Amino acid sequence: MPTINEIKEEAVKFRRLIESCDKKNTSLVIDCFPVMSCKLTSMLLSYHFLTLWPELELKGVSAATGKNSQITHYWLEIDNIVVDITG
């Protein structure tokens, strides 16, 4: 199990890579990142984490609020650690 600092370090590094990529030529990253990117970004980050730490247990969490639950968000949890690089 990675430490909270290792998780944070990798998450920050991953977000910086997304922010610095050429969004016009990267089909998985949209120009308005991080807006409207929470689920796909969390899925990509989970793949990255599992590549680094294959035995890691993580889960994706989805929530909705607002009128007719129109405002949604998605993030990862590792034990009791919330990992959200789009929030």
Image: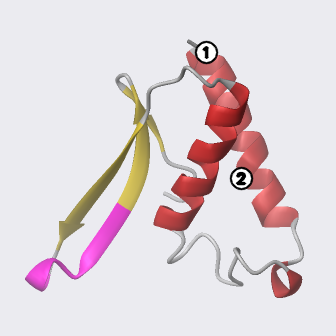
For residue 60, above or below residue 25:
above
Q: Which span is picked out in magenta?
A: 67-73
Q: CA distance from mark 2 to mark 1?
A: 18 Å
* Image location (x, y in percent) of residue 50: 62, 34
Compared to residue 58, the image places residue 2 above or below, namely: above
Identify residue type, mark 1: Pro
Q: Nearer the viewer, mark 2 or mark 1?
A: 1
Describe residue 22's horizontal placement relative to residue 69 as left or right. Answer: right
* Mark nearer the N terminus (2 vs 1): 1
Q: Which residue is mark 1?
A: 2
Q: Dividing the picture into quarters, in which one does residue 29 lie? A: bottom right
Q: Secondary structure at mark 2?
A: helix
Farthest-out residue, left: 68
Q: Position of residue 66 (x, y in %)?
A: 15, 77
Name, please, the residue furthest toward the front: 54
Q: Quadrant of residue 72?
A: bottom left
Picture quarter containing residue 1? top right
Residue 71 falls inside the magenta stretch: yes
Residue drawn 22% across and 82% down? 70
Which x, y percent locates residue 17? 82, 55
In this rendering, the answer to whether 43 lies above or below 57 is below
Query: In this rendering, is residue 5 above or below 17?
Result: above
Residue where numbered disc 2 is placed: 15
33 part of magenta stretch? no
- Mark 1 neighbour class, 10 Å CA radius: few under 14, some 14 to 19, many 20 or more: few
